[in-house]
Image: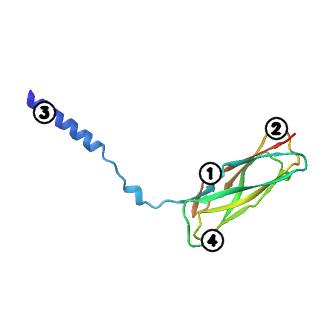
Amino acid sequence: MKRLNIIFAILTLAIFTVSCETNYDDYDTPREIVVGFSTPGEAFELEDGEEKTETLNIFSSEATSADRTFNVVIVESDVEPESYTFENTVTILAGEREGSIDITGFGISLTEEEKTLTLLIERANAYVSGGPAVITFTRDE
């Protein structure tokens, strides 16, 4: 009986030892480059006729040896088009991982109800799109 308990203890220990092995084989696996907004959003509270410009930062998970230009697209919007303008491309320079665009809000056609504009870096074959930027617009009284 004593021998059976020892064998059982050894088998149990062996099972736990083998099952806890961690595999890090995917560490060197090539990963897709991610490009997205590092500024999660901005809030524009504008009086009628007022104009305000903010900068939205964009990141890339990798720096490359050449300049890269990415398209900025509207994913969703309930804001009137005359209430904003933004640069629809962003260039990240060679050796860099960051870029930025300016968005300008205009106090035109805004109400006290919050309206939202969601921007995203357009996906392409060489990279995947990261986080969006959500910009809110309201009229300031």
The residue indicated by pointer 1 is: 131
Going from the N terminus, do you reach mark 1 or mark 4 first?
4
**Label 2, label 3: how far apart the Cα atoms are:** 73 Å
Tag 4 or tag 2, which sits nearer the N-term?
4
Q: Amino acid at mark 1?
A: Gly
> Disc 3 vs disc 4: Cβ atoms closer than 8 Å?
no
Q: Earlier in the sequence, mark 2 or mark 3?
A: 3
Q: Which mark is residue 67?
A: 4
- The residue singled out by tag 3 in the image is 6
Secondary structure state at the residue bearing disc 1: loop
- Label 1, label 2: how many angstroms apart (C-alpha)? 25 Å
Verify CB contact (< 8 Å) between mark 1 and mark 4: no
- Disc with the residue nearer the chain's start (1 vs 2): 2
At label 3, which amino acid type do we have? Ile
Instruction: Single out the residue that lies furthest toward the right.
Output: 49
Residue 91, by quadrant, is: bottom right
The quarter of the displayed image where residue 16 is located: top left
User: Gap in Å between the C-alphas at discs 3 and 1?
Assistant: 55 Å
**Cα distance between the residues tagged 3 and 4:** 66 Å
- Quarter of the image with the N terminus is top left
Q: Which residue is mark 2?
A: 113
Q: Which mark is residue 60?
A: none
In the depicted structure, whether residue 110 falls above or below residue 96: above
Q: Position of residue 56 (x, y in %)?
A: 70, 55
Q: At 62% across and 56% down in the image, what residue appears?
A: 36
User: Where in the figure is residue 11, as x and y percent of width and height?
Assistant: 19, 37
